[in-house]
Amino acid sequence: MGTLSTHVLDTSTGRPAQGLTVTLESASGQSLGTGTTDADGRIPSIGPERLDAGDYRLRFDTGAWFAATGTRGFYPEVTIAFTVADAEEHYHVPLLLNPFGYSTYRGS
């Protein structure tokens, strides 16, 4: 299994962050997949069909997204580094975002 999904919510408006580009990278910086959040702020699957155990990064292009929404933001990108410990599990990495802060956690 070893799959990955993400979900982005704009906490300043209480709405999903639709149209935000996200890139999955290996620890060495190799691009493994790119997606754009849907109307619900979700990317149900990003990257290869199976993620091996190891370290990865999700890079969220928040600067372009804020510019497209007419919002002045402080963070031009958000990068979340995480470890896939079990290649048989599904990993979900949500991002709670606003123009001047963000938080994340491992979802399910």
Image: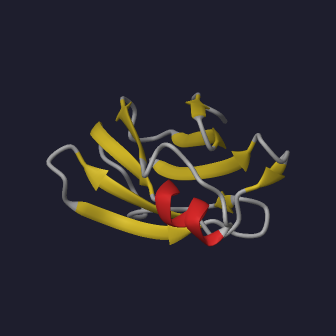
Number of numbered callouts drawn: 0
**Residue in view at x 45 percent, y 41 percent:** 88
Residue 41 in the image: state x and y as whole percent.
71, 59
Residue 83 in the image: state x and y as whole percent.
35, 31
**Residue in view at x 64 percent, y 41 percent:** 97
Of the pair 66 and 5, the residue shown nearer to us: 66
**Residue in view at x 68 percent, y 67 percent:** 69
- Res 66 → quadrant: bottom right
In the image, is 65 to the left or to the right of 8? left
In the image, is 107 to the left or to the right of 9? left
Of the pair 88 and 91, the residue shown nearer to us: 91
Say whether residue 1 is visible. no
**What quarter of the picture does the C terminus occupy?**
top right
Which residue extends farthest left? Answer: 28
Of the pair 40 and 85, the residue shown nearer to us: 40
Rendered view: 94 above or below 16: above
In the image, is 94 to the left or to the right of 59? right
Residue 99 in the image: state x and y as whole percent.
62, 44
In the image, is 71 to the left or to the right of 82? right
Of the pair 30 and 71, the residue shown nearer to us: 71
Say whether residue 102 is visible. yes
